[in-house]
Image (cartoon, grey):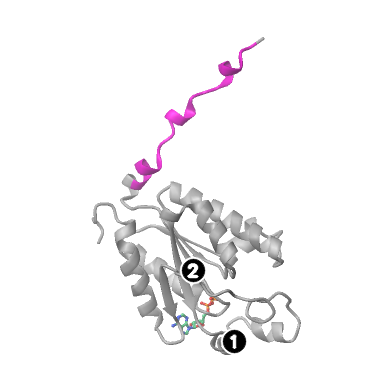
C-alpha cells in the first residue's frame, strides 16, 4: 500500500508569506470596519476613504452590501442567524485580502456587539480597525437615501435596523464619527490620520 506521506507535498514552504506580499505592495493589510445605521454615511465615507488612500499610494478594496449581498451572500436574508453568517463570510473574505497585503474598507450595518466581536475575532484584533459611523436614527431617517425607512415604517420591510430591530451603540470603537455634525471630508481625514501609521511600511508613504 502506498504510504500516506507519499501524497503530501510541502507546498507551504513554497507559498509566499503575507509579509512578502506586504513588502511588494509597500503597505500593511488591515480591515477598516465601518458600522452604523442605514443612511449614517458608511458607503459615502468608504468610497471617499478609498480614494484618499489610493491617492496616497495604498491599494484598498471596499466591501459592502452591493458587492457582497448581491454575490457571495445572495442566499442570506436579514434574520439574526443570516446576519451572523453574512458577517462571518465577510470577515473570512477580508482575511484573504489582508493576507495579500490589501486594505479592506468594510461598510456594513453590523448592528450588535456580538456581530462585531465575531468579525474582530475572525480577522484578529491586530488587523481590525473599528469605526462607528454615528448619526441619530432621526437624521438617518430624514436622509432616507434609499427610501428604506419609509418602507420599513410602512411595514414593507421587516427586521430593519433602527425601526424594528436595534442598533447597539458601539462601545470603545477605535474611531467615532458624528456624521450629523461632521463633514464627509473631516470624517475621512480623521480615519486617514488614525490608519496611516498602521498601514505604512517604515512610514514610506506618509
Ligand atoms: P449608509 O451606507 O450608511 O447607508 P450612505 O453613505 O449610503 O449611508 O448615505 C448617507 C447619506 O448622507 C448620503 O446621501 C450622504 O451624502 C449624506 N451625508 C450628509 N452628511 C454626511 C456626512 N457628514 N457623512 C456621510 N454622509 C453624509
Q: Is mark 2 within 8 Å of ligand 1?
A: yes
What residue do we see at 53% from left, 85% from top?
Answer: 136
Residue 94 in view in this figure: no
Q: What segment is highlighted magenta in the picture?
A: 2-22
What residue do we see at 48% from left, 28% from top?
Answer: 11
Q: Give the number of the disc on residue 141.
A: 1
Q: Quadrant of residue 161?
A: bottom right
Looking at the picture, how far across and down is residue 115, in whole percent?
Answer: 59, 63
How packed mark 1 is, by other alpha carbons closer than 10 Å (few <14, some 14-19, many 20 or more), is: many
Quarter of the picture holding the N terminus = top right
How far apart are the two marked residues, 2 and 1, measured between alpha carbons? 19 Å
Quarter of the picture holding the C terminus = bottom left
Residue 87 in view in this figure: yes
Looking at the picture, how far across and down is residue 13, in whole percent?
Answer: 43, 29
**Who is closer to the viewer here, 113 or 57?**
113
Q: Quadrant of residue 153?
A: bottom right
How packed mark 2 is, by other alpha carbons closer than 10 Å (few <14, some 14-19, many 20 or more), is: many
**Who is closer to the viewer here, 131 or 38?**
131
Circle 2 — which element? Answer: strand
Q: Earlier in the sequence, mark 2 or mark 1?
A: 2
Q: Give the number of the disc on residue 34.
A: 2
Looking at the picture, how far across and down is residue 3, in whole percent?
Answer: 61, 13
Q: Is residue 130 magenta?
A: no
Note whether 64 is above or below 169 in the view shown.
above
What residue do we see at 37% from left, 70% from top?
Answer: 191
Looking at the picture, how far across and down is residue 92, in whole percent?
Answer: 55, 51
Q: Quadrant of residue 131?
A: bottom left
Amino acid at each position: 500500500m502506498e504510504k500516506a506521506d507519499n501524497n503530501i507535498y510541502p507546498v507551504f514552504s513554497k507559498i509566499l508569506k503575507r509579509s512578502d506580499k506586504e513588502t511588494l505592495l509597500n503597505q500593511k493589510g488591515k480591515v477598516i470596519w465601518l458600522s452604523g445605521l442605514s443612511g449614517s454615511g458608511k458607503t459615502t465615507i468608504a468610497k471617499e476613504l478609498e480614494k484618499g488612500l489610493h491617492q496616497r499610494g495604498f491599494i484598498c478594496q471596499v466591501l459592502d452590501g452591493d458587492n457582497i449581498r448581491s454575490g457571495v451572500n445572495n442566499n442570506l436574508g436579514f434574520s439574526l442567524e443570516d446576519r451572523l453568517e453574512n458577517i462571518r463570510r465577510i470577515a473570512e473574505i477580508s482575511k484573504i485580502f489582508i493576507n495579500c497585503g490589501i486594505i479592506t474598507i468594510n461598510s456594513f450595518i453590523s448592528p450588535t456587539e456580538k456581530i462585531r466581536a465575531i468579525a474582530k475575532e475572525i480577522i484578529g484584533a491586530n488587523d481590525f480597525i473599528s469605526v462607528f459611523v454615528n448619526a441619530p436614527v432621526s437624521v438617518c431617517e430624514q436622509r432616507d437615501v434609499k427610501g428604506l425607512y419609509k418602507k420599513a415604517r410602512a411595514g414593507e420591510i421587516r427586521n430593519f435596523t433602527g425601526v424594528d430591530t436595534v442598533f447597539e451603540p458601539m462601545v470603545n470603537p477605535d474611531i467615532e464619527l458624528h456624521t450629523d455634525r461632521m463633514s464627509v471630508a473631516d470624517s475621512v481625514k480623521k480615519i486617514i490620520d488614525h490608519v496611516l501609521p498602521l498601514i505604512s511600511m517604515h512610514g514610506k508613504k506618509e
